[in-house]
Amino acid sequence: MLQLAAQLRGMARDELRDALALREFSTDGIADLFDLAEALLHQDSLDHVIGRLDRPHLAVLAALATAPHQLDGNGLAERIAALGAPAELQEALPALLDGLRARLLVVDAEGGAAGVMHVPAAVVTRLVPSLGDGLPEVEALLAPAPPVLQVVDEVDRSLLARRASEQAYATVAATAELLAALGAQPARELAKGGLALPDARRLAEVAGVALDEVPRLFGRAVEAGLVVRDGAYWLESDAGAEWSLSGPAERWAVLAECWRERVPPALRELVTRRSETLSAAAFREDVRWLYPVGGDWLDAGLARLAGEAEALGLAVSGEPVQPGRLVLGGQIAEAAALLGAHFPAQVDRVYVQHDLTIVSPGPLEPALDARLRGFADVEGRDLASSYRVTAASVNRGLAAGETAESIREFLGALSLTGIPQPLDYLVAEAASRFGAVRVSAAEEGDVPAKSSIRSDDEQLIGTLEVDQSLSAIGLRRTGPHRLLSRFTPDVVFWALSDARYPVAAEDADGRILRLQRHRLAPTPTAAPAGDPVGKLLDVLLAAPADGPATEQAWLARQLEAAARAKETLTVTVRMPGGQTADYLLAPASVANGRLRARDRKADIERTLPISAIAAVAPAPEED
């Protein structure tokens, strides 16, 4: 632990932050660098980091940990060469050592020659006993990868390509519907975690997926930054809105890139080892070889990635397909083109029918679809989609800024069948009734009410007053033409709109306000507040790094740690004449500024003032 604590002490803040970001440990009770070193050497923290080492890193660590004495870089290179390491691993040795140092599994040996490396005793204890008993021996870890066996491909590749494309397109379409639904009405997050059940059911219905598939669909959108939490609610992000207006292949590429980022780089490289077809069984075999200590985290990761791969068309019936290999190799555009070749063609024209429905013979171009949804409700979503125009949906479009003329003009350019008379009449009628009910902010004398509802139609006001579907907003009548509510104007407006009343919002001067339900949350650009590692470093690095008091405190902590670990140290003591002398001491206790220790050579107990100690170092290794 002494060498690790010393290494931590000599690291710059940014270097230390990067190292700690690679480790899993508890920050509770850490008051100084010795506490931090102790936390990093706890068995849970070591098991976590060692279990995630790939085979090359593990092999180099094992070779260093089992060496009969401490080695420098040249000595380690000679050792792994003698143990049969292939040339590519020998060439990668400097980078592999950098990786182990970055994870604080290898540190500089204190008091030794320059470049000599040390593996902390706690690391050796967790790793070495497993070699040959659950883990391969060092020689086997250093051995080259087994030869790749090519698989004879007897499957109809065109059939697999079509099935992969169908699944990929279905996932993209379901995600787009999810975002559209969140744009219309945010989803609430429960205090205990997870979406509220009514919202989950609503999202499942609009996305056309089973209820138990919603968490995965939703999680995929969250990881891609398409959905953002704002307080207790989830909303579509501005990145999600941009994604929704792109083509299906571009949408898929965003999801695929997000999937790829969650795959460890070493797993991606496994795929490039194979020039032909890669089977799921062979891939798992490669993964097991690469991560010998993988365990539960690897099983869970493989299961999750396999499930996501299936959803994105990167695998079919559990077997990887060509787009999966391309994505893992970083060729996202090529994979998108391969899958996109089988996506249904987008259309820019529709059939407007006399029954007030609009039928799109294929997926409507995103911009046209978004405009049409503004004043029409989606009824059926498939390769051929259908929309229905109602008085309420037209009123919604009018409230967002459309006019009867703009709706007619848009439908006229979009329709292959013109605008049927029933639809034209409906739009005109809705426009004439638009604003028959007006919502505005309540006046000062209306407190505690926040909203005022007025209409020239006294009978309509009476209908609003007794409408049970509006009971949630608590309407209270104050005159023949006026109602009050304790809720804000936007809440009251959308409640009336959902109840299919011809409502408009207005300001204090009676001017119509254009409201859009679709509210976007900004995509986060910075890391969230509350960084535990940053706070920990603020505490640990706040004290001065040098000075007599700091040096004595550092010596005391080194001696206390050695006493707890029953380690023997080389202690350099200042003598009265100015000379120094080295003692081989086993510290027993540190108290009142004095060290009590057993002198290993003289076999006597010594008591020394800490102020007389110039330095401490690990005891030399016995030959």
Image (cartoon, rainbow, N blue to C red):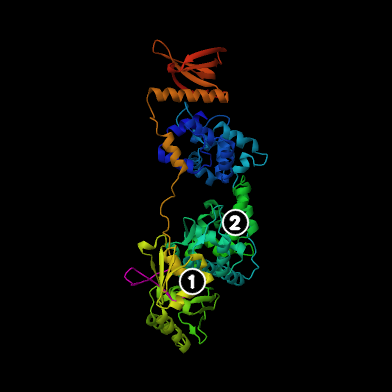
Q: Nearer the viewer, residue 532 or 511?
A: 511
Q: Nearer the viewer, residue 398 or 92?
A: 398
Vertically, is 259 above or below 613? Answer: below
User: Horizontally, is 151 left or right of 392 in the view?
Assistant: right
Q: Which residues are magenta?
A: 498-516
Q: Name the residue furthest right.
A: 133
Q: Residues within 10 Å of mark 1 (few under 14, many from 20)?
A: some
Task: Say what amino acid the circle numbered 2 marks.
Answer: Arg
Q: Residues within 10 Å of mark 2 (few under 14, many from 20)?
A: few
Q: For mark 2, what is the residue? A: 304
Q: Nearer the viewer, residue 321 or 148?
A: 321
Whichever of callouts 2 and 1 sits on the residue coming sooner in the sequence is: 2
Kindly report which numbered mark, 2 or 1, lies closer to the viewer in this rendering: 1
Query: Can you see residue 499?
Result: yes
Vertically, is 51 above or below 369? Answer: above
The kind of secondary structure the magenta stretch mainly shows is loop
Q: Name the residue furthest bottom.
A: 421
Q: Which mark is residue 465?
A: 1
Label 2 close to label 1 by CB (< 8 Å): no
Q: Quadrant of the C terminus?
A: top right
Q: Horizontal and vertical percent for residue 98? A: 48, 41
Task: Say what amino acid the circle numbered 1 marks.
Answer: Glu
- Which residue appears at 46% of the width and 82% of the height? 349
Classify mark 1: helix, strand or loop.
helix
Q: Nearer the viewer, residue 87 or 251?
A: 251
- Residue 505 covered by magenta stretch: yes
- Which residue appears at 64% of the width and 66% of the height? 153
Q: Horizontal and vertical percent for residue 163? A: 60, 70
- Which residue appears at 59% of the width and 44% of the height? 51
- Residue 58 covered by magenta stretch: no
User: Horizontally, is 211 left or right of 9 in the view?
Assistant: right
Tell me which corner region of the image, top left, top right, bottom left or bottom right, holds residue 277.
Answer: bottom right
